[in-house]
Image: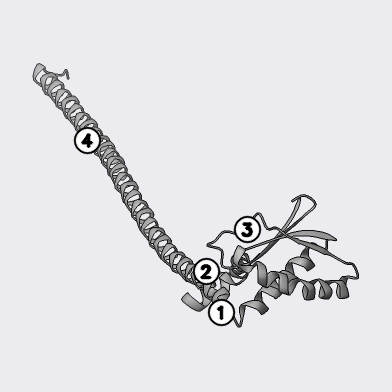
């Protein structure tokens, strides 16, 4: 029995419907996959941009924090420097006050002769030369002349050699000097200062750390002393 035209049409229609349905499903599958890939790519781009934004603001935050630390450190250092300067200024005033009081020593007629003798002896023992030139304040010449014989004898008793001391009657220590002597030998190539000012400077350089401690307390960061 042969297939009728009607059956052929039905089969063709059924085949066309199947192809159309398959094409529709395939298109929908492609659209779904494309949308999925689009969403994945969109999510990746969004995440990428989000990461960049976060990194940017983290970097900015770190820069701000670093700047804050630098400013804080600078302010702290400035404060420390101002504090140190104030302390050094105060210490300088203390030493200047001590220097200003030196003139009172030479003005003390009872104490100054013994002090001047000590300064002369210190200079002689530092020099240990057989001939020296001594300079002093013009006002001190009579006192120096009276003290020299005893000083020279004391030096000789310890050193074993005689020393000739020539008092310079042409050149004197400055009028503003607090007192003491300066000695030279070998045409000025050897020189020793034994004035009240030089002794104060020597003592100050040795006891500045102790003065700082007395004025401002111990520094916990200081491991060594000047």
Name the front one of labels 2 and 3: 3
Distance, label 2 to label 3, CA atoms, is 20 Å
Question: Mark 2 vs mark 1: which is more N-terminal?
Answer: 2
Residue 35 circle label: 4
Disc 4 crowd rating (10 Å Cα; few below 14, some 14-19, many 20+) is few
Q: CA distance from mark 3 to mark 4?
A: 107 Å
- Between 177 and 6, the one lying in front of the other is 177
Q: Residue 70, percent across and down?
A: 38, 53
Q: Which residue is mark 3?
A: 172
Q: Earlier in the sequence, mark 2 or mark 3?
A: 2
**Rendered-image quadrant of the C terminus:** bottom right
**What residue is pinned by disc 2?**
99
Q: Secondary structure at mark 1?
A: loop
Q: Viewer-proximal residue, 210 or 143?
A: 143
- Alpha carbons under labels 4 and 1: distance apart: 108 Å
Residue to which mark 1 is pinned? 108
Task: Report helix, strand or loop for mark 3.
Answer: loop
Q: Residue 157 in the image: x percent, y percent?
A: 87, 75
Q: Residue at x 14, y 19 (%)?
A: 8
């Amino acid at each position: 029995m042969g297939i009728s035209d009607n059956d052929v049409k039905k089969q063709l229609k059924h085949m066309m419907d199947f192809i159309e349905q398959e094409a529709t499903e395939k298109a929908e599958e492609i659209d779904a996959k494309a949308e999925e890939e689009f969403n994945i790519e969109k999510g990746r781009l969004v995440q990428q941009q989000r990461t960049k934004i976060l990194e940017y603001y983290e970097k900015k935050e770190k820069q701000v924090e670093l700047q804050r630390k630098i400013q804080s450190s600078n302010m702290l250092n400035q404060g420390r420097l101002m504090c140190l300067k104030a302390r050094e200024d105060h210490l300088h005033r203390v030493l200047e006050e001590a220097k200003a009081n030196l003139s009172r020593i030479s003005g003390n007629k009872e104490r100054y002769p013994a002090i001047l003798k000590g300064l002369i002896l210190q200079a002689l023992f530092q020099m240990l030369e057989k001939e020296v030139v001594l300079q002093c304040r013009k006002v001190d010449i009579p006192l120096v002349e009276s003290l020299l014989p005893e000083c020279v004898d004391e030096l000789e008793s310890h050193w074993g050699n005689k020393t000739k001391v020539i008092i310079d009657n042409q050149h004197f220590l400055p009028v503003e000097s607090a007192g003491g002597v300066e000695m030279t030998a070998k045409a000025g190539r050897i020189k020793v200062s034994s004035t009240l000012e030089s002794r104060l400077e020597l003592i100050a350089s040795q006891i500045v750390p102790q003065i700082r401690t007395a004025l401002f307390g111990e520094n916990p960061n200081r491991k060594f002393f000047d």
